[in-house]
Image: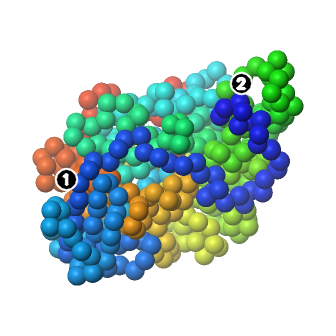
């Protein structure tokens, strides 16, 4: 956030129902897609934005989708590469709204509120977790700090551009705005994970107090900048922590909030309403208990479904039906991996579990594609197979909701980045946790927060 922008923006109380599409900054690419034209011919296409297309053709040029339709309805230039996908299913690249891959080390034990910390400063682009995500058909991740802090720092939205030898720096993966700044949200958490000995809170009430106190300071900080006008001598000392909170209150940074219990969920909605920050509720293990309240606040949810969730008391009331209950209440629902809590290679299984728990097939597939794009404010670029969208694709050997289906190929911006027929990629797809790992395992909140990953 630049100082000038901070001066010009009014910080009133924005309704918690603020549309996420209004929080988006332009998500330009920091890595140009490779030139070239490719036609995927003869497969079953799942655009997500419309009805499935059998025996279809998807035509891609220069990293973007140019045309999609029935085989005979799409004109393919003679010089285009043709990929025979008869018997295959093509869907948009999958989107995970909550991941910890990348060996991140963000906020530390010096305090419970650290909004100025940036995941981008500690992310290892050579972490094997990214390759495993590609093996699961994922193409975009929201990589976040852990939940051991009330405010754990700034997340980053990554496009998995792993063609050739892979990226050398994070700049090759990051979504960026028109000014070249990395796009991401703000990670917050409540419940038991951020609770500890002082200076960390010991109760839920103290947790909310500390968050409220810091947001009030951020509002006052912004007001001082406004009053200073063009007089630099009257500007307060720059505060990177408060700047990040101001961005959230301005709707320029989406808050991604870890929360499990129903009372904790309601507390998040209360704070969002009080300070006007747009929020995505993550996990919501007891969201089914307050589905109507969530719907009334127009707060979207990023949820996780696990069939054996033991070990976390807050999540003991997690049920497979949460997605279906939220869907019927009118809540926008996306799924996430929380990798390494669940394996990115099995992300499609989340949609299948959602259907088993009562979600419609349509909304379950949206929950791993278009809904995730919306929750990150990236729906203009990804999440559906439509002309003008990025050519991010997952090619499957069967129905996406079948446990027998495998991801055969993953493409990012028209470039193939995973191929199950390649022996190295196959090892990543079927190997254990150490597959393709060059370094030690990552832990999203190493040290005192090691158990607070979710």
Q: Secondary structure at mark 2?
A: loop
Whether residue 210 is visible: no
Of the residues tagged 1 and 2, which is closer to the observer? 2
| Viewer-nearest residue: 278 or 57 | 57
Task: Determine which of the numbered discs, if any, sits on residue 419 in the image.
Answer: 1
Q: Callout 1: few (<14), some (14-19), or many (20+) C-alpha neighbours within 10 Å?
A: some
Residue in the picture at 83% in, 23% down: 231
Quarter of the image where the N terminus is located: top right
Q: Secondary structure at mark 1?
A: strand
Residue in the picture at 50% in, 48% down: 27
Residue designated by label 2? 239
Percent from the top left, x then y, of residue 268?
72, 50
| Viewer-nearest residue: 256 or 84 | 84
Task: Determine which of the numbered discs, if any, sits on residue 311 in the image.
Answer: none
Q: Is residue 78 left or right of residue 300?
A: left
Residue in the picture at 28% in, 69% down: 58
């Amino acid at each position: 956030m630049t100082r000038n922008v901070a001066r010009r923006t009014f910080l009133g109380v924005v309704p918690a129902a603020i549309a996420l599409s209004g929080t988006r900054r332009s998500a330009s690419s920091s890595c140009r897609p490779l030139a070239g034209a490719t036609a995927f011919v003869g497969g079953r296409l799942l655009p997500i934005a419309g009805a499935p297309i059998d025996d279809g053709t998807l035509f891609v040029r220069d990293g973007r989708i140019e045309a999609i339709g029935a085989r005979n309805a799409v004109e393919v230039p003679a010089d285009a590469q043709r990929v025979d996908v008869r018997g295959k299913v093509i869907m948009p690249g999958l989107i995970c709204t909550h991941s910890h891959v990348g060996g991140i080390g963000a906020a530390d034990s010096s305090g419970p509120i650290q909004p100025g910390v940036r995941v981008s400063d500690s992310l290892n682009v050579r972490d094997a977790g990214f390759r495993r995500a590609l093996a699961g058909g994922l193409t975009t991740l929201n990589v976040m700090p852990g939940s051991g802090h009330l405010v754990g720092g700034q997340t980053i939205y990554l496009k998995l551009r792993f063609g050739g030898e892979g990226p050398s720096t994070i700049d090759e993966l990051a979504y960026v705005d028109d000014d070249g700044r990395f796009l991401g949200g703000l990670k917050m958490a409540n419940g038991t994970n951020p609770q500890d000995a002082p200076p960390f809170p010991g109760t839920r009430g103290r947790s909310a107090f500390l968050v409220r106190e810091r947001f009030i300071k951020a509002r006052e900080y912004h007001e001082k900048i406004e009053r200073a006008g063009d007089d630099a001598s009257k500007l307060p000392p720059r505060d990177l922590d408060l700047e990040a909170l101001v961005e959230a209150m301005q709707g320029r940074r989406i808050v991604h909030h870890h929360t499990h219990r129903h009372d904790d969920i309601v507390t998040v909605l209360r704070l969002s309403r009080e300070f006007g920050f747009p929020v995505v509720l993550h996990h919501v293990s007891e969201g089914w208990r307050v589905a109507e309240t969530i719907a009334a606040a127009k707060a979207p949810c990023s949820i996780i479904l696990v069939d054996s969730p033991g070990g976390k008391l807050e999540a003991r009331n997690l049920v497979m039906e949460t997605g279906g209950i939220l869907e019927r209440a009118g809540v926008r629902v996306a799924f996430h991996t929380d990798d390494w809590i669940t394996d990115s290679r099995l992300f499609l299984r989340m949609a299948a579990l959602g259907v088993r728990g009562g979600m419609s097939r349509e909304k379950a597939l949206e929950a791993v594609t278009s809904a995730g794009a919306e929750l990150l404010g990236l729906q203009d670029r990804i999440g559906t197979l439509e002309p003008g969208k990025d050519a991010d694709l997952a090619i499957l050997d069967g129905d996406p909701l079948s446990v027998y289906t495998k991801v055969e190929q993953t493409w990012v911006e028209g470039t193939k980045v995973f191929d199950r027929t390649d022996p190295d990629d196959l090892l990543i797809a079927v190997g254990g946790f150490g597959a393709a790992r060059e370094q030690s395992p990552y832990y999203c909140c190493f040290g005192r927060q090691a158990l607070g990953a979710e």
